[in-house]
Image (spheres, rainbow, N blue to C red):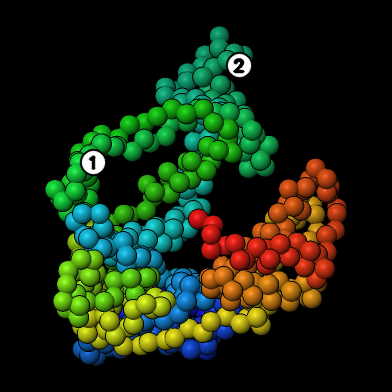
Amino acid sequence: MGRIDIKNMNNPEIQFTPREIVVELDKYIIGQKDAKRNVAIALRNRWRRMKVKEDIKGDIVPNNILMIGATGVGKTEIARRLARIANAPFTKVEASKFTEVGYVGRDVESMVRDLVEHSVNLVKSEKKKEVQEKAEQIVEDIILDALIPPIRNTRAVTRDAGTDNNDSTPQSDAELNERTRERFREKIRNGELEDRKIEINVMKPANSGIGMIGGGMMDESSMINLQEMVSGMMPKKDKKRKVTISEARKILIEDESSKLIDMDEVKELAILKAQNTGIIFIDEIDKVAGGSSKKGGGGPDVSREGVQRDLLPIVEGSTVNTKYGLINTDHILFIAAGAFHVAKPSDLIPELQGRFPIRVELENLTVDDFYHILKEPKNALTKQYEALLSSEEVTLSFQDDALKELAETAFKINTEVENIGARRLHTVMSQLLNEILFDVPDKIGPNAQIVITREMVKDKLDGLVKDKDLSEFIL
């Protein structure tokens, strides 16, 4: 199965089918079938649009999605994993950060600039892989030159009867130098000299030193353009550093790869990739819901509605100026999410509601969900702790009954204290394993085997459940 081919956006390679996308999401996220199906359809529709050859292609816009659900049920994770499956630029913003724009909030266009920045990094990474082999050869020569500088034979060597037996001619010195270099080249390739220190030249980027004093004097876009212009005029300086060959290789590979790629092509492809496959996740959209017109007053509601009206043209489709060029937001997929405990989706301004036609309500997690979250995903917390302790050569394992007890405890605390979804599992796992993590490797040495049982879970978490009544007094 392939990915979207950014080299030819009009003829993309075969993408995942909606069913395959759901299977991929199932590896990391438990439950939430409706949400997975809707994002899978949205992703596949983007591939379908790029296959359309008629004029109507430009009129096919993505169906933006509004996810409704409590914190910790998987809203952000679904969007993030979707972007990874599609190898697409992704950025997450919180709508509440845009409140009181011009005073303490961020400019709404900044989320599009963040998306383009991520897209540039993605394309650069892909391009660097293409020039990796060539860059490695150049770096090897630089390291070799630092170890054994080459001798250049710039003049012809003439020999007469008096110099035939002289072994110190420039020609023989050059040959000896070349043989020595080849021996050291083999040592470098075999990793025999990784800890030897050499001196290398590192390009020090120019720093414009320009910052913004005060707020509202200049918008973010103008500030970026000014900084780019000034830093482009500043001369770049070489800086000498003495590092090990191992460190030098990492530094120089990055430097030489950047020199080999065409940044103009990277920028052009990045804009195309962001426009056609970019995903922007707007979290806490419920925090800016609620209009002043319903209450007949001012206050914070004015700011909230102002943010909604600022978001509207971006979601509808507009052109945003970035330091890499202009980007059109018509075909960016927007996924908004919120708990909507206080506000309702209908409290959003009608124009913005209309731009999120697909609404998905995510379900609260059950005890069974918690159990499967601990056991099945590739990045399950249990597997994370097992990996951490395996680095100390300690084997950690969990009995099935222990996982069920952990799930029941997390669910009970969520029900009686505050529902923070799957994030509650971090609390209970930390409480359960902190003592073990502290004792390794001082008291618990290598090759130890630790089995977590139901009794251990009850013993460690009993206090956590009993203290729930005091939680409301803890600041």
Across and down, in percent, residue 352 comes to 24, 80
Q: Residue at 60% across / 25% down in the picture? A: 176
Amino acid tagged 1: Gly
Neighbour class for label 1 at 10 Å: few (<14), some, many (≥20)? Answer: few
Closer to us: 422 or 225: 422
Q: Is residue 351 above or below residue 222?
A: below
Number of marks in the image? Answer: 2
Q: Is residue 273 above or below residue 321?
A: below
Residue for badge 2: 167
Amino acid tagged 2: Asp
Q: Is residue 66 in view?
A: yes
- Does label 2 or label 1 sit earlier along the sequence? 2
Left or right of 17? Residue 30 is right
Numbered badge on residue 354: none
Q: Is residue 383 above or below residue 202?
A: below
Q: Secondary structure at mark 2?
A: loop
Q: Residue at 76% across / 53% down in the picture? A: 436
Residue for badge 1: 211
Q: Secondary structure at mark 1?
A: loop
Q: Residue at 43% across / 27% down in the picture? A: 240
Q: Residue at 32% across / 67% down in the picture? A: 95
Neighbour class for label 2 at 10 Å: few (<14), some, many (≥20)? Answer: few
Across and down, in percent, residue 47 comes to 38, 83
In terms of image quadrants, where is residue 434?
bottom right
Q: Nearer the viewer, mark 2 or mark 1?
A: 1
